[in-house]
Amino acid sequence: MPTQREKAERFRALHEGGGPFVMVNPFDAGSAKILAAMGFAALATSSGGFAGTLGRRDGEVTRDEALAHARAVVDAVDLPVSADFENGFGHEPADAARTVELAIGAGLAGCSIEDFAGDPNEPFYDLEKAAARIASSSAAARATDIPFVLTGRAEGFIRGRPDLDEIVARLQAYEAAGADVLMAPALPDLAAVERVCASLTKPFSFMAGVPGRSFPVKDLAAAGVRRISLATSLYRAAMGGLEAAAREVRDMGTFGYVEDAMPSAALAEYMQS
């Protein structure tokens, strides 16, 4: 079993490769084992996928619950695991820093901190505070000997404020504040992706999973992307399969899904190991 430091070093090195790597998003320990067995190089938790397993919406999970989930995924696989920790579970820079400290304690190789505050009156942190939250998080990570990978997220396009100039300015500020990787979910097209990548000196992580905005790996590579994550899309795909199978039983009285939906023998054995 590799140590946490070894996994974090491996995770950091993945961002320095010649092309983008896909960091897939399990929603529990079982799905993490399946994805690890399939040969993916790194995993990341999905705040929305995990919330769904609890019957909740994204944003309705506590820090303690998210950390427990992250530990379960870390313990299930030998791969580097990053975590979607939303806004760091608190508004102040110290809150985000504490979340990073706890993330390292949970065995993670990285995590993301976003700039969406969730307040209906002021949905986003202003740029100065958002950058301060990244700076505080980065300082917390650097205080350990784990080469933890901190991702700074600008949420404008996925949260109803689609201003590309602002996204670029925010990502540049987060880069300057110490983020190792930058991310801006739901960019509208490849031209926007290319502009964002060209504006940064550190790796950009693209989030697939948005209908109409999930571009092929080869096109993202050409645009300069270094990492690709899948957000809640695997959880949604799994729930879509569940719904289709249950509909067959309810409407047709047949069980064809039993033959169609079983994992390979190798994966089934891995899941039970």
Image: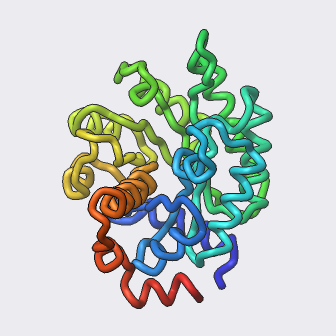
Which of the image's four quarters has the N terminus?
Answer: bottom right
For the point 64% across and 58% down, the residue is 148
Q: How is the image coloured?
A: rainbow
Depicted 107 relative to depicted 152: above or below: below
Residue at the outermost front position: 253
Q: Position of residue 119 (x, y in %)?
A: 63, 18
For the point 69% across and 50% down, the residue is 66
Residue 253 location, quadrant = bottom left
Depicted 219 relative to depicted 262: above or below: above
Residue at the outermost top position: 121
Which of the image's four quarters has the C terminus?
Answer: bottom right
Depicted 31 relative to depicted 190: above or below: below
Residue 107 location, quadrant = bottom right
Q: Position of residue 12 (x, y in %)?
A: 53, 62
- The answer to whether residue 5 is seen in the rendering is yes
* Relative depth, front residue between 73 and 79: 73
For the point 39% across and 79% down, the residue is 263
* Relative depth, front residue between 272 and 246: 246
For the point 55% across and 73% down, the residue is 79
Answer left or right for 201 relative to 115: left
Q: Position of residue 137 (x, y in %)?
A: 70, 41
Q: Exactly how many numbered labels are in the figure?
A: 0
* Relative depth, front residue between 152 and 185: 185
* Relative depth, front residue between 104 and 86: 86
- The answer to whether residue 134 is seen in the rendering is no
Answer left or right for 196 relative to 177: left
Depicted 178 relative to depicted 256: above or below: above
Q: Position of residue 84 (x, y in %)?
A: 58, 48
